[in-house]
Image (cartoon, helix red, strand yellow):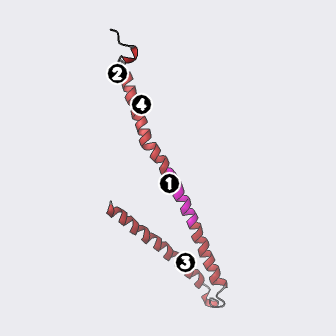
């Protein structure tokens, strides 16, 4: 009885076997590294653009606070007190930055301790 050709095992040379193994390894590495890196790139772009817009918003808010302090409080900051609005806005910006850092570290510590 003769075995049909499609049922016969394919006989490959060692070079063909090695090429198959290398092709499989390349496909596996591409699937396991490139796809996650691409999704990480998207998250990185969204994070950086969000940080940029948040930073622009904070700067505009601080400039608005400075403008309010300079114009709307009357003569409170006149004479030798003209530095006060700038000082108050700088302190407000530093406090906001410190708050962001403290909250960020607190969240990081919780995440590290839980894992």
- Name the residue located 42 percent from the left edge and 71 percent from the top edge: 102
Which mark is first along the chain, 2 or 3? 2
Going from the N terminus, do you reach mark 1 or mark 3 first?
A: 1
Query: What SS does tag 4 mark?
Result: helix
Q: Where residue 23 appears, x then y in whole percent?
A: 42, 30
- What residue is disc 4 on? 23
The span picked out in magenta is 41-54
Q: Secondary structure at mark 1?
A: helix
- 2 or 1: tag closer to the N-terminus: 2
In the rendered view, tell whether residue 33 sits above or below residue 99.
above
Report crowding for label 2: few under 14, some 14 to 19, many 20 or more residues within 10 A (C-alpha): few
Numbered mark located on residue 90 in the image: 3
> What kind of element bears circle 3?
helix
Quadrant (top left, top right, bottom left, bottom right) of the N terminus:
top left
The span from disc 3 to disc 2 (Cα, nearest Å) is 72 Å
Query: Which residue does the image show at 58% across and 64% down from the upper left?
Result: 53
Q: Earlier in the sequence, mark 4 or mark 1?
A: 4
Report the residue marked by disc 2. 14
Query: Which residue, given by chain and number where applicable, does mark 1 sit on?
Result: 43
């Amino acid at each position: 009885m003769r075995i049909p050709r499609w049922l016969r095992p394919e006989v490959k040379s060692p070079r063909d076997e090695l090429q198959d193994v290398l092709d499989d390894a390349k496909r596996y590495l591409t699937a396991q590294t490139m796809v996650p890196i691409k999704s990480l790139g998207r998250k990185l772009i969204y994070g950086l653009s969000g940080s940029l817009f948040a930073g622009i918003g904070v700067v505009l808010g601080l400039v608005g606070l400075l403008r309010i302090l300079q114009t709307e409080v009357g003569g409170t900051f006149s004479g030798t007190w003209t530095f006060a609005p700038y000082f108050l806005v700088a302190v407000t910006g530093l406090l906001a930055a410190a708050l962001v850092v403290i909250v960020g570290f607190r969240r990081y510590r919780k995440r590290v301790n839980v894992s």
